[in-house]
Amino acid sequence: MTAIQALRGTRDILPEEIGYWQHVEAMARQILSRAAFREIRTPLFEQTELFARGIGEATDVVGKEMYTFTDRGDRSITLRPEGTAGAVRAFVEHKRFATGGPQRLWYCGPMFRYERPQAGRQRQFHQIGAELLGSADPRADVEAIAVAVELLGALGLQSLRMLVNSVGDRTDRARYRSQLVDYLTPHLADLDPDSQDRLTRNPLRILDSKVPKTQEICRDAPSILDALSPESAARFDRVQQALTDLGVVYQVDSRLVRGLDYYSHTAFEIQSDDLGAQATVCGGGRYDGLVSELGGPETPAVGWAIGMERLILLLQQLQPLPADRVDFYVISRGDRAEQQALKVAQDLRQAGFSVEMDLSASAFGKQFKRADRAGAAACVILGDSEAETGTVQLKWLAAGTQETIAQADLATKAEQFRTIIQGDRA
RNA sequence: GCGAGCGUAGCCAAGGGGUUAAGGCAGCGGUUUGUGGUUCCGCCAUUCGUGGGUUCAAGUCCCAUCGUUCGCCCCA
């Protein structure tokens, strides 16, 4: 019988590691709700159409990375490859645009893309995302970015690099695109094969190619920032000014192009050098056309997503997780004692302590050993004589001291215990 | 989808064609049948991801397959 393994590109998050996830989630909840973002949970799968229309048929995400299948009702279903499309779908479906004022939404959960796994990239991965819908104000872009920066900072991440760019509006991009194609076409033969292919499909992406020769050619390419209309350029200036005023450190990277079709104006990425080839921890930008594309009214919006695996990779490099510890470890031997131990454990738990019970009925020596391993502050001991007298022996493991306490008194001594345990752990 | 490296116990591993597969950590048992974290002793892979092949002989060489890692592409 061969054991079944988790599918390629998926993995289990085991108890030893879960602390990072809980910490990140708790921090996200705190920082985002403090900025008046409200959590939304949308389905993990949607009609394929949603992503095809929202993300763009020409993108790699839609073209070759989607988990798409036909369900029993012959509908084409896709496991969500990102969070924005679903959030916007919900925004439109529930007519949240009619509530007046911008909506701030955030989410967190698994996304699915059919790719070859590598460092910082899996088939099921997790994102925290935030969307600010209903404002075209440049301050909205900055507010969104600032919240992301705040979150990463609160998690203690340093030496991250913030890159900002403006890809203008549709007209700007069309103008730039033809400028770029005009520039690159004479160099066609010198470009790497991938980039040659992209020249017709998605020329802007050639700019961030990693091939040295292509990079060299791109160095002298026209900049999108020069192709922006005066209005778009002024807008980008205001974003930069506001970022500076907030003390956000960033650099303008005119070659930063985000992969999804729906971006306009502000695009930004937060990168780290400690992640291998997948350097981006957070990516986002403005997507003014998406809501109407998905059947809602013209609604400007801006948002971002953080890759949780990548974030946690960085966190793990930063500091180890404190080991799990339990306050009390209950050991017992003998029928009556074992019976009473259940009740003692329950009393202590109800008094607010974490309590692990030894179920082995093996020699006390063995049970003590396990108490140590559990990182217990104290061992609660029940043997025949304790069972007889309705007491327990309480042994404080760090000090090695031991006292006799009536089982009935355990709960009333909770405060005293708490002080000792805190002192122990300090 | 493409390229490269690697799969030996729960973990880290040595072994690179010659009968019995080092070592360490962890675990289990004992020293201690009611007192831990130390020591000491013992146990812990009929088998090297899987399937096929070459050979008198295969963890060791070859092929395939699966998994994994890293890179390309792409992205968070």
Image (spheres, rainbow, N blue to C red):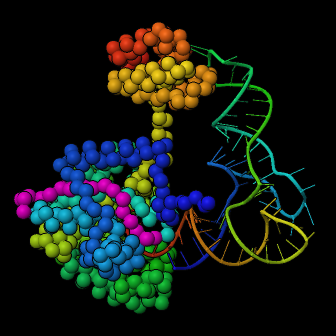
Q: Is residue A265 visible?
A: no
The residue lying furthest to the front in this view is A335
On the rendered structure, is B59 left or right of A221? right
Q: Is residue A101 magenta?
A: yes
Q: Nearer the viewer, residue A310 or A369?
A: A369
Left-right relation of A228 to A102 = right
Q: Position of residue A180 (x, y in %)?
A: 33, 83
Kindly indicate the quadrant of the structure image that contains residue A188: bottom left
* Front-lying residue, A258 or A404: A404
| Side of A301 where A253 appears, left or right | right
The structure residue drawn at horizontal position 15% and vertical position 74%, both measured from the top left corner, is A295
The residue drawn where x is 20% and y is 51% is A38
Residue in the foreground of this view, choosing between A9 and A133: A9
Name which residue lies at 28% across and 69% down. Answer: A46
Instruction: Residue A127 in the image: state x and y as whole percent.
Output: 35, 58
State whether residue A117 is above or below residue A353.
below
Dividing the picture into quadrants, the one containing residue A62 is: bottom left
Q: Is residue A237 left or right of residue A124?
A: left
First to last magenta residue range: A98-115
Relative to B45, does residue B47 appear above or below in the rendering?
below
Residue A349 appears in the figure: yes
Q: Position of residue A278 (x, y in %)?
A: 45, 63
Instruction: Give the total number of marks visible in the rendering.
Output: 0
Q: Which quadrant of the figure contains the C terminus of chain A?
A: top left
Foreground residue, B65 or A344? A344
Placement of B37 over or under A393, stated as above or below: below
- Examine the structure image and report whether residue A55 is included in the region drawn in magenta: no
Q: Residue at x 49, y 76 (%)?
A: A211
Q: Position of residue A69 (x, y in %)?
A: 37, 75
Is residue A250 depicted above or below A389 in this figure?
below
Quadrant position of the N terminus of chain A in the picture: bottom right
